[in-house]
Amino acid sequence: MADINKKKAEALKCLGNEALNQEKFEEAIGHYSEAIKVDIDNHVLYSNRSAALTKAGKYLEAIGDADKAIHLKPDWSKGYSRKGVALCNLSRYEEAFEVYSDGLKVDPNNEALKEGFQKTKGFLSGPGNSQPIPSPFAVPDMMQKLQANPKTREFLKQPDYCAMIEKLKGNPNDLKDMADPRIITTLGVLLGFDIRTPSAFTEESNSHDMDTDTQQPQTFPGFQNASFPSPNPPENSTSESTKNVNSEALEEKEKGNAAYKKKEFDSALSHYSAAVELDPTNITFRNNRSAVYFEQENFDKCIEECEKAVEVGRENRADYTLIAKALARIGKAYLKKEDEENALRYFNKSLSEHRTPEISKLIVEIDKRMKEKERLAYINPEVALEEKNKGNAFFQGGKYPEAKKHYDEAIKRNPDDAKLYSNRAACYTKLMEFNLALADCDKCIALDPKFIKGYLRKGSILLAMKEPTKAVFAYQKAMEIDSKSEEAQKGYRDAMMAEGNDPEAVRRRAMGDPEVQAILNDPAMRMILEQMQKDPNAVREHLKNPQIAAKIEKLLECGIIAIR
């Protein structure tokens, strides 16, 4: 079954590669996603999907897949390269620089990593080799943003406005045109807020499920000392109207927060919806509305609202922590729907925006659960028996590597069958892999302490490893199960003989005898033994004491001491 899944994943990967070469990016993403479903731990598939996502402009998702590839295979350079490219496309050069640096530690001669390292280094011209804050007039998607906004879309029809934009693209610090209200509006659109709008307000809610922070206006150092004239707008101007609308929206949000705390979710939903209507560009209002849907267990609606929140947040350059919160809530909703695969996907997306201990822990727990479910789903005693019989046939034919493969598969199919470990231990013994054979014997004994074959195999392996004392104990255990077992008796005799030829082995076994331990732990006996070592003639005196003589005789029998 495992081989079939791998072949299916490989076929889907090839389809994805073909679609990617033809620049059919969404189709490629689909093929890679299907391949991942059948081969979830294949790092190459995540790397390839990361490449397709980057080509499709889905950079954050590409980072998530690159992270997964790195997690699965930390010593593989391409995962770092994929993540670096995606980060560069988001102009996150400091992070990309660190990723390329980490990749070069793994593969110092990788040309793609070297090139990425040098490229990102060139962007770090700020203080202490930091990344300078880019000009809003130099972002790659500037014209798309201006076209998307109703106000600036009209401005673009005016030739003098277009000329000013081109000038500021070339030199963003040229402030001569900043007195023009159109440029002030443009700056607000590019930075994701209205410059003339109050920036923030204080939240009093302590709810962890509800978003209580608002979008903070970003600052741009190139304009921090600029003087912005305040033109006299006509009565009922857009500026005053916007202020009033935002004020009303914030009021509705506050009412929603109060209702949410009281668990009056219908009322909270009504107020948050009113806030969204008044200011549809604020991600926080949508995040709060999604929290209500979550509490009402309307998880599909919660997911839909969060996805819209992410879309709105990206369009308006919301703080990355707010976007991370929306993505995390999608993951939690999927978790409630018992869709762990999608939950894991969105938690990884959230983590690529903002790392929090809670989400990191959830990812580890879900990943562990998914692997355990996959393992349990794979168990099939009937198939295990078939694989065991195939392994036995190869073993009898002397084809031990082939036999081991079938025993491996049998154990995966039925990991609680002690006999399978015993069979594989025999196979490992033939392959001279004694440590692995011994580990399988211990597993066999742990699963079934009454299965004599486990002890017999262990005894023979220990003899082969020249551990006769341990072999003696293994055969003793076998004889406790079946005192008439000829194999156990013969093994015990062989181990005792081998031990007799190894004084150190005898001594080790003797030290395990409680009576010997008691003698050696007796301070008076230790003093006598030290005296005997210094003066051999002192033995005669001590042997006159029957109690001491008995103890010395016991030590002599066990080989702990010798008298010459």
Image (spheres, rainbow, N blue to C red):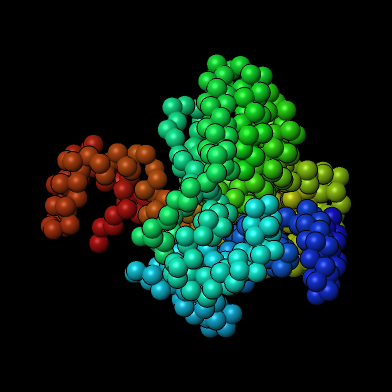
Q: Position of residue 532 (x, y in %)?
A: 17, 53
| Residue 269 picture quarter | top right
- Which residue appears at 81% of the width and 49% of the height? 384
If the image is split into quadrants, where does the N terminus sit? bottom right
Q: From the top left corner, tell me how far across and down residue 441 is, in percent.
A: 63, 51
For the point 52% across and 63% down, the residue is: 136
**Residue 176 placement (x, y as % from top left):** 45, 68
Q: Is residue 81 above or below residue 240?
A: below
Quadrant for the C terminus in the image: bottom left
Residue situated in front as seen by the camera: 125 or 202: 202
Frontmost residue, 548 versus 82: 82
The residue depicted at 45 percent of the width and 71 percent of the height is: 174
Whether residue 369 appears in this view of the structure is no
Pinpoint residue 201: horizontal percent, then vertical percent: 44, 35
* Residue 389 in sight in this render: yes
Quadrant position of residue 550: top left
Q: Check the image and report above or below for 101 versus 290.
A: below
Q: Depth check: give the residue in front, 150 or 334.
A: 150
Give the total number of marks visible in the rendering: 0
Q: Seen in the image, is 3 located left or right of residue 41?
A: right
Residue at x 34% of width, y 69% of height:
128
Image position of 152 with respect to 380: above or below? below
